[in-house]
Structures are given as structure tokens and as C-alpha cells.
Image (cartoon, rainbow, N blue to C red):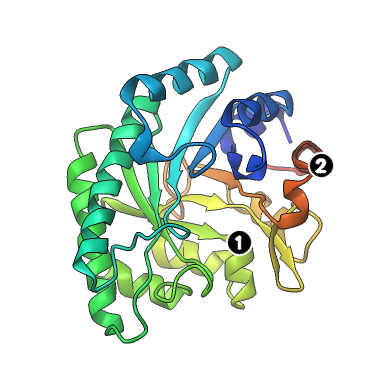
Amino acid sequence: MKQEILQDRFAVMNNLWQKYSLFYALRSIRAAGFSKVDLWAGEPHLFIPDCSYAGLKTVRRFAASLGLTFSCLTPEMNGYPLSAAISDMGMRERAFQYGKKCIDAAEALEAGHVLFAPGWRYETDDRRESIHRTAEFLLEMADYAEHKGVLIETQHLTPFSSNLVNTIDDLQELADFLDDRIGFVADTSILCGQGEKIEDYLNAFGNRIRHIHLTDGKDGSLHIIPGEGTVPLKEIVETCPAGTDRIAEGWFHTLEINAVPCLSEPETSIQKTYHWLQAIDAR
């Protein structure tokens, strides 16, 4: 792979360095040869409600000093008491407040995208009503982000992370309530685990797919080092060219590696990933 393609089209998510500081993670990402970061905003790196504008600008300046930019802000929602889909109005209101703070943070960090989880519901909640509540949240976030230079996306997740949106059919059901301001993210190890293909997502959503979580998996393990699992990642990278109407202009891959064994050796994991990408013929 040509270096300019690797630099332009691949972002690294910092949650691989959960056992290290954010500043350590950013230095490691740059040292590995990457220039874009998909900024996972979760403890211990970045807890959005505690962040000040000045603090976020400090992070932005530090990243810039290394030659890094932020492609996306991916706020942690699955592990926190937050859900836009739930019938508990207090929890839902907290999610709305959190979402707007995330958009403000993305603006301060000059990250052009925010990826929100679709949320989860009480098992006793009506599923269709829960989908509609998530749609209301995403549309309000799009309203708030409209004049801030930030795009809003959502994605399918594993049943462990969401009991609402797990498959392409679930995502299509949610999309029926949304407008074109909301984009989508496809996660390769999750969709392959469901027996789906990346082509299914590209055909269904076209240029509303704004980025792809390029993740590998095998034997039930997800988000392992690319090339070490059974997901046909090489084929996916080589068949997702820029400049087509099957994917959004300016799209990118996020390298999300957070399997437990990788967290103890983040440098080794990201170096293996970089060398694996170099051997791919991407255009």
C-alpha cells in the first residue's frame, strides 16, 4: 500500500491503549506511522463531562505537534449509564446532554465526525418504540451539530453492547426513521460474525456509509489484530475504492483493536497492523 493512502484513509482508535494515558497513546500512534486518530472518549483517556474547552484544545495542540489529526470522536456510551433508546426519562435526558457535550468536544478537537452508539433498552420496553427514541436522539444531535462542522453517525453493535441494533436489518429499521444527515458505520468483525458481508452494507446504505471499522475476529473473539482472524479484510480493503457512490466521499477506515490480549501489548499490536496494511494493494 502506498504511504499516502495509508496516511489518508486509515485512523487508529486509541482504546488499544486503555492501560496508558491518552498522551502516551497519541505518541505511540504517531510512532507507528499513522497520522489520523479516531478518538475514543472514555475513561481513563477522556471523560467528556469533565472536559473543559481549554483542556480539549490542549489535547488538539498536542496531537498537532505530533502531526496527528482527529478523524472522529467516538464517545463511550456502552459502559456508562447512558442510553437514548431507554424508556427511563432521566437516563435518556442524561444521554441528550452528554451527546451535545460530545459534539462541542468534537468541534474543539476539530474532529469532523461523532459516532454515537444506538443504545440499549429494558427487555420489557417495546422494541419499535425504542428504535424510534434512538432516532429522535440522533436527529436532535444532527440539528445541534449542523452549524458546528460535525457529522453524526451510528452503527450496529454486538448483542452484548446493544439489544437494539445488531444486524443490517436492524440498522435499516433505524434508518427508516432518519434523514440523510445521519451516516452509518459498518464493523467488519461484527457483521461477519452475523453472517453478513460488507457488500450488503454498501449496497443498502451507499454513500451514507461514512467509515468502516476495519476489525478482525475468530472463534468468537472480536477486534483482534488485522490479519490474524478469519474476516476477509484484505478483500474488503481492496474492494472499497474511493470515488464511488457506494460509499461516502472522504470515507475512511478505523482500526479498532481492543481484544483483551492486545491491551497488554499495544505497540506490538499496532506495529503488526501497520506492516499488514503495507502489504495490501489498496487504491
Q: Which quadrant does the C terminus fall into?
A: top right
Pinpoint residue 22: horizontal percent, then vertical percent: 57, 31
The label number, if any, that marks residue 188 in the structure image: 1
Pinpoint residue 117: horizontal percent, then vertical percent: 40, 59
Q: Secondary structure at mark 1?
A: helix
Q: Nearer the viewer, mark 2 or mark 1?
A: 2
Give the mark nearer the N terminus: 2 vs 1.
1
Residue shown at 28% from the left, 83% from the top: 125
The label number, if any, that marks residue 226 in the structure image: none
Residue shown at 68% from the left, 42% from the top: 282
Residue type pointed to by label 2: Lys
Is residue 5 shown above or below 264? above
User: Is 81 on the left or on the right of 200, as rendered?
Assistant: left
The label number, if any, that marks residue 272 in the structure image: 2
Q: Is residue 88 visible?
A: yes
Residue shown at 71% from the left, 27% from the top: 33
Front position in the image: 212 or 129: 129
Pinpoint residue 45: horizontal percent, then vertical percent: 53, 37
User: Is 251 on the left or on the right of 225, as rendered?
Assistant: left
Pinpoint residue 175: horizontal percent, then vertical percent: 31, 67
